Image (cartoon, coloured by chain):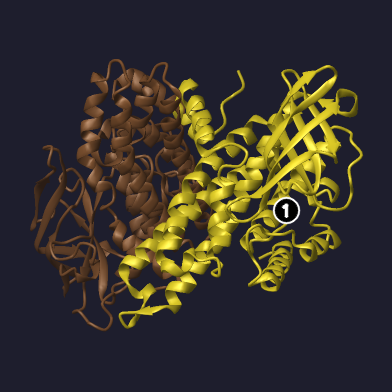
Amino acid sequence: MSIREFLTADRAEFGWRPAVDCWLAKWDPDFSARLADAGFVGLTIPTEFGGRGLGYLHRYVVTEELLSHGAPVAAHWIADRQVAPALLSYGTEEQRNRLLPRIAAAQLYSAIGMSEHGAGSDLAAAQTRATRADGGWVLNGSKVWTSGAHVAHQIVVLARTSPLDTRHRHAGFSQFIVQTSAPGVTISPIVLMNGERHFNEVIFSDVFIPDDDVLGQIGDGWHQVTAELGFERSGPERILSTATLIFSVIRALGDVDDGIATDVGDLVARMISLRQLSISVARTLADGGDAVNRAALVKDLGTRFEQDSVELVADLLDYVEDAEPLRALLATARVHSPLFTLRGGTNEVLRGVVAKGIGVR
Amino acid sequence: MNELAQLVDDLGRRSFDARLGHRGLPDTLDEALWRNLEDTGLARLTSSQDAGPGEAAIVLSGLARHAAAVPIAETDLLAAWLAAKAGLPEPDAGPLTVAIADATETGGRISGTAREVPWPSTTIVLAARTADALHVALIEAAAKIEGHNLAGEPRGSVTFDVAVGDTRTVDVGVADQLTRRGAWARCNQIVGVLDAACGLTVAHTTGRVQFGRQLSKFQAVQHSLAAMAGEIERARAATALAVAAATDYGFDHPATDYAVTAAKVAVGRAVPPVTTIAHQLHGAIGVTIEHRLWLATMRARSWVDDFGTTTQYARRLGRMALAADDPWDVVVSYPAPR
C-alpha cells in the first residue's frame, strides 16, 4: 500500500481532518500506531531495531505526503525525526535495543528540552546542569517551549555538565534521556494565544538519571545537537505547515479570472521551487555532504513562505463561494504563523548562518 | 567546476576583461569571443556537437555570468535548431537569431512584424505563426528598426513579407517548443547574471568601509546578503528541475513544459529582490554606467520578460493547479495528459 492509499483509507475510516501545522498540533496516538503498523514509521531505522532500513530520501517522500495531507503525526514526530537519528549516531547498543523498536512502532513519544527562559536564540546560555552522583547524574534547572512534554514518555535534555567557560561557550554540554514520570520532574503548560496547549515549562529538581540514560558522550552535547540540524532545517516541514490550507482554498476556488489564476500560480511556483531546493539539500545530506548553508536557507525561505501564504490565501478566500468551512483552518494558521519563523532557530539566526557561509561573518 | 564550466568561465572572463571600460549602449557583438566559441565548438553545442541540455545550461549560465555580448542561446538552441527542424539549409558558422511573430497569409505571401528580436543584425531564422502552421524561413532582406534592451543588447523590430513557397511549414507545436526553449535558456542565463550580481555585491560590501567598518560587518547588510543568496538558490533549484526535465525527456514533453513554467516564475520572482538588494548594497556607484553592476542587473531585468512574462507563466501554472484534482500533484510533478 502506498502512503497515499493509506492516508485516503485511514481518513475515510477514522475521520480525522487535514490540519494546519499538523506536526506540532495534531497529537493522535492511535493514528501514529496505525501508521506504524502500515510500515511508515521508523523508515530509516535499521531492520534489526524494528525499522524499515530505508534511505533518507524515502523518508522524505513519506513525510511530505503526511504533511501535505495534514495528517495527525505529532505523537511520534519528534521521536521518529530527531531521537531515532541521534540514537543511531550516538546511542549505546543497549539504548538502541531498548528504544528504537518502540520508536519504530510509534509506541514511544519524546520531547526535546533545549530552550530555557534565559536561552532562546542563544542556546549556549542554557543553565540547566547535571552533576555527578553515584551511578548516574542529578539534573537541576528548567526548560521552556518543550512541545508535547505533557504527553510524552521522555524528554531529551541538553544540560551543562561542566561550568561555563566564556572562551569556549559550547563546551561542557551533555544530553540526557529523562523519563517524564521520574521523581522531581514538574511539567506545566505554556498556553498558546488561541488556548491550544502544545508547549510546556519543565522543571527538574534533583532528578536522578542513571548512567544508562546518558545520550552520547559527556561534554559532547553541543556537537551532538548541532550535527544533525541540517536535516531538521531543510525538511518538508519547513515548507508545508500551511499546505492543507493552501490546497483547500485552491480546490474551493471555482471559475476564477486570470488575476486570481496568476496569484495561485505564484503560490504554487514558490512551493515547487522551495521543494526542489529542499530536495537538493536532502540529496547532499543523504550522500554525506555538507549543506549547512543551504539548509539554513531552506528554513529561512520556507518558513517565510509558510507565513506569507497565510495572508495570500486569506485574500483568495474572498473569491470562494462558501468560505465558511475554511475559516477555521485560516484562524489556526493565523495563530500558528508567528511560530513558523521562530521554532528550531529564529530566521535572524539562520541569516547569520547564511552570512557566515557567504564569508562575510 | 567541471572541465566545460572551467572553459566557459575562462572564455567569459577573458572577454569581460578585454571589453572592460568599453561597454555602452548599445553594446556590440563580441567578435573575438564568438570566434573562440566557434573554435571550441561551444557556439553550436547542441545543434551540431551532439551535446545535451545539461551542457547547454553550463554554457548559457557561465557566459551570462560574465555578461558576454553574444547571441549564444539564439544561435544554438533556437535558430539552428529551428532551421534543422524545418529542413532549411542551416548556416553552419556565424551568429544566428530568431524572429518570432504572429503573421498573416494573404495572396500567397506571409507578412508581419516581429518585435524585440534579439541581435537583429545577424542572420535571421523567421518563425512566423499563422492560424494553422508555423512558417520558417531564412530572411536576409527585411526592414529593421534597431534598438537595445536595458543591458545594451541589440533588440529590434523586423518586418517581413515572404512568399509562402520560400518558407518551410512545420507543425504549430514547434512554435510552442521554440518559446519553451527560449524561456528555458533565459532561466539559465538569469541564474548566471544573478550569481554575478551577488558576487559583485559581496565583494563591494567587503571592500567598502563606512563608520570605520566594512559594510559586510553590519548585521543589516549581512541579512540582506542572506536574503539575496536565498532568492538565487531558489531560482537555481527551480532551473535545475527544468534542466533535468529537458535532459530526461527532451524539450517536447509535458514534464519539461511544466518544469520550465515553474522555473520561469521562480526565476522571474527572484529578479526584483536580487537586483534591488544588489543596487541597494552598492550604493549610488552601482547605478552608473562606469560600474559593471548594470551589466548583470539590467540583463536580468530585461531577460525576465523574454519568451513570455513571469505573469503569463504564473497564470499557466495557476490554471494547472486549479484544474488538478489535488493541487499537491502539481507541486510534485507535471499534470498527467488528459
Question: Hey, which quadrant is residue B177 in on the image?
Answer: top right
Rendered residue at 44%/76% (across/down): B206
- Residue topped by disc 1: B55
> What SS does tag 1 mark?
helix
Residue A169 in view (yes/no)? yes
In percent of width and height, residue B49 lies at: 84, 51
Residue A73 in view (yes/no)? no
Relative to residue A291, is residue B54 depicted above or below?
above
- What subunit carries mark 1? B
Of the chain colours in the picture, the one used for chain B is yellow
| Residue neighbourhood size for the residue with mark 1, other residues' Cα within 10 Å, grouped as few (<14), some (14–19), many (≥20) | some
Rendered residue at 83%/57% (across/down): B41
Rendered residue at 33%/53% (across/down): A83
In percent of width and height, residue B56 lies at: 72, 51
Numbered marks: total: 1
The chain drawn brown is chain what?
A
Q: Quadrant of the C terminus of chain A?
A: bottom left
In percent of width and height, residue A234 lies at: 42, 52
Nearer to me, B285 or B270: B285
Nearer to me, B169 or A16: B169
Rendered residue at 72%/59% (across/down): B28
Q: Amino acid at mark 1?
A: Glu
In percent of width and height, residue B68 lies at: 68, 61
Nearer to me, A317 or A334: A317
Nearer to me, A35 or A126: A126
